[in-house]
Image: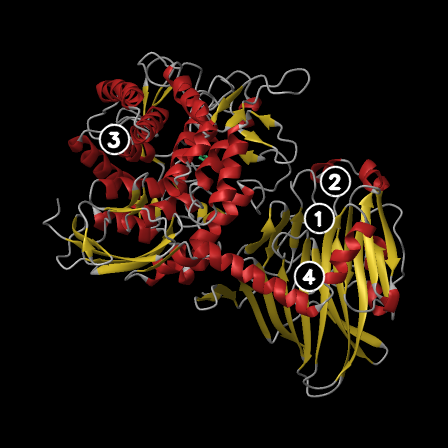
Amino acid sequence: MEYGYFDDRNREYVITNPKTPVKWINYVGTLAFGGLIDHTGGALICAGDPALNRITRYLALLPGSEFKGQTLYLRIREGSRYRVFSPFFVPTLDPYDRYECHVGLGYVRIVSEFYGLRANVTLFVPPGEARLLEDIRITNIAGRPLEVDAVPVVEYTHPDALKQITNADWVPQTMQSKAYPEAGGLLILAQYPFMLRDTRINYLTSNRPVSSFESDRRRFLGDNEYGTWARPLSLQAAELGCYEAQRGDNIAALLHHLGPLAPGETRRLITQLGQAPSVEAARPGIAAYRDEARVDRAFAELAASWERYLSSLQVETPDPAMDRMLNIHNPRQCHTTFQWSRYLSLYQTGYGERGIGFRDSAQDAMGVLAGLPQEAKELLRRLLSVQRAGGSAMHQFNPLTMQASVGDAAERPDLPQYYSDDHLWIVLAVCAYLKETGDLAFLDEPVPYYERGRDGRPLATGSVRHHLEAAVEFTRGDLGAHGLPLLGFADWNDTVNLRAGAESLFTAHLYGRALLELADLLRHLGETVAAGKYLAWYEEMKARVNACAWDGAWYIRYFDADGTPLGSHTDAQGQIYANAQSWAVLSGFATPERARRAMDSLYEWLNTPCGIKLSMPGFNGFDPARGGITTYPPGAKENGGIFLHANPWAIIAEALLGNGDRAYAYYAQINPAARNDQIDTFECEPWVYPQNILGDEHPQFGLARNSWLTGTASWAYQAGTQYILGLQPTYAGLRIDPCLPAAWAGYRARRRFRGATYEIEVANPEHVSRGVARLAVDGRMLQGNVVPAFADRATHHIEVVLGLASG
Ligand code: NOJ
């Protein structure tokens, strides 16, 4: 069964059946102001931090049919009664004649037809604004005049999102609303918890006269809330009660008489849900966005900002589903993870237990470098500022307060209180930023370390370069019995939590990769001695890994504190782990024979038609000595599930080994855009990568969950663009080193790089996977495959021919 279709021309996915297996969502705005809109118009909006400044009350745990955060009611006068329904389908669930939810770039548009009314409602946050606009157009398609009212409704939460759930005394005693009538019947309905009355208010307002309003949920639903969101009793009266809530569950409902609509006639109503220091401060912005032309301009500006972002790379390959992802949906998901880290989705509910993840955001930044270099730099600065002076990093931080924590490690004080991989990701991310932008001055910028004195001032500050060096030095000094990095509370795999003293092969590989990056950077800076030092450290770790971690047909994943290997053929469960193989290639530690053998073992034991499993066989029973992995049944999440984040690493590893067919097969099999006809199994949005898919040990093999906020976004984008298509930023320029499926005759791409535009045409006449035989820049042959960076902002034509004659 299909629930909708891709509209590539408009860069949308159009949902045509609102009864999707789980809610499907889109994001509007940014972390500064924005949130998620579900496909039936529910909205979770916040400003700066979903835990500490949440605006709408969206309870993801309620069934899909329930009101969540906001809706729009329409009503048609029928004699002395009203026919009341929501054009968003939820929460009234009326039968619809047409229903479309257009999931666009930074907006959601719901187009529906019920009872002779067509609604066309676009929800978006104008770039840089602290307001959600709802641009509502209602058209009479009944063939007879209709008397129509429109009632947008928002339900507020206390800004402290968790307190709203946990404290049902303090919260309702503080919540208040106040109406500010304006000339011409316009109204601003403000809402605040008492303590913020004079400093920060939320408001709902519109550009048409409001004949009455309600701000108290009990009065709106009626009958002491035995009236329901599906049938609010107050909407059967001619007017709402105009009650300014002094406490309780605050809502904002604004009743607009759109008047008699003649057949074919359309009325436009624009609402604004915003936040400001005060109503006075909000007035100019409110006035501006009451103007229809201003709203049209804002929508055009939104489209232009997405166009700017996406135009950093557009491709044309023989695979339309790959083009769809690389040109539209994958970079959009990268933008989303970059904004929200793992903080706010239907699965990561933003109540404060996570915040912005250090390692997650470092990897997310790598997905947006071409499109948002300045914003990425800003995020890197923030991440560096929660690195400890010793080189390791805090695991996550709250974006409003910059208060950091050790994450889940805090729940297990018996285990080490740091993650062994966190700090190493920042080396990869900063080097990737430098290669994209050439902004080497960033290395000298001073950034404080996290530790603070009693006065709240940083105890130490170091240059960005010093931060990177401290990161690898920390790992070099934090070794276990085999000379491998200690695991800490966990490495990238959060869920293997072993006794102190355990060692991590993943961290060893990531350390190796980070050392190669640093050495490459230093060589570029002309510092060969310093580069040599890191290469010596690299060789030292490579030798240790190869001396103790080869299991015969694959690399093991950990050593337990007592020296027992994990991820070995001797294990009954967790015999082989994907990351131990792919990262042995990414680090360059694996010898060529072992690399091939390890990746073949991965293919043989871990590959499925829905993607690569993280490990196998799954642990079958809770074992506190193993940690979180054993809290899942076999086949779920990290316990033998298809944990998608790890799949692009296998793609990259295969590409590095030159196996273009397998790299592409791995890419194609997890492409969500190719799952549109399998939604009854897959269940999640087909335009984003989910974090996990149940593996083949689970009865519901193929079921996806935790869509949107996953490192899969950034890595699938990197794997597709840098390793399959082979467009790799380097310090010297753009290296072109594709690793294609042999069947491909080539591809085209348009890449913005350091201000210039590269029109790239790759031909593959001999149907090889890899090897640049010829490369011409603007018609002139080039030695090698690194196209120089041009400072001219011009367009350059790059012709590449792959073939066996490559040097
Ligand atoms: C999700 C976390 O956000 C990410 O940091 C981690 O690497 C994966 N889980 C794997 O455990």
Q: What count of labels does the image hold?
A: 4
Name the amino acid type tagged 4. Answer: Pro
Q: Is residue 714 left or right of residue 28?
A: left
Of mark 4 and mark 3, the one earlier in the sequence is 4
Mark 3 or 2: in front is 3
Tell me: is circle 3 under 8 Å from ligand 1: no
Q: Is residue 439 left or right of residue 576?
A: right
Q: Position of residue 82 (x, y in %)?
A: 80, 74
- In the figure, residue 448 lies in which quadrant? top right
Is residue 686 at least partly visible in the picture? yes
Which residue occupies 20% across, 30% down? 553
The mark that comes first in sequence, 3 or 2, is: 2
Residue 328 spot, x, y in % from top left = 44, 58
Q: Nearer the viewer, residue 258 or 581?
A: 258
Residue found 70% across the figure and 60% down from its top: 71
First in residue order: circle 1 vs circle 3? 1
Q: Residues within 10 Å of mark 1 (few under 14, many from 20)?
A: many
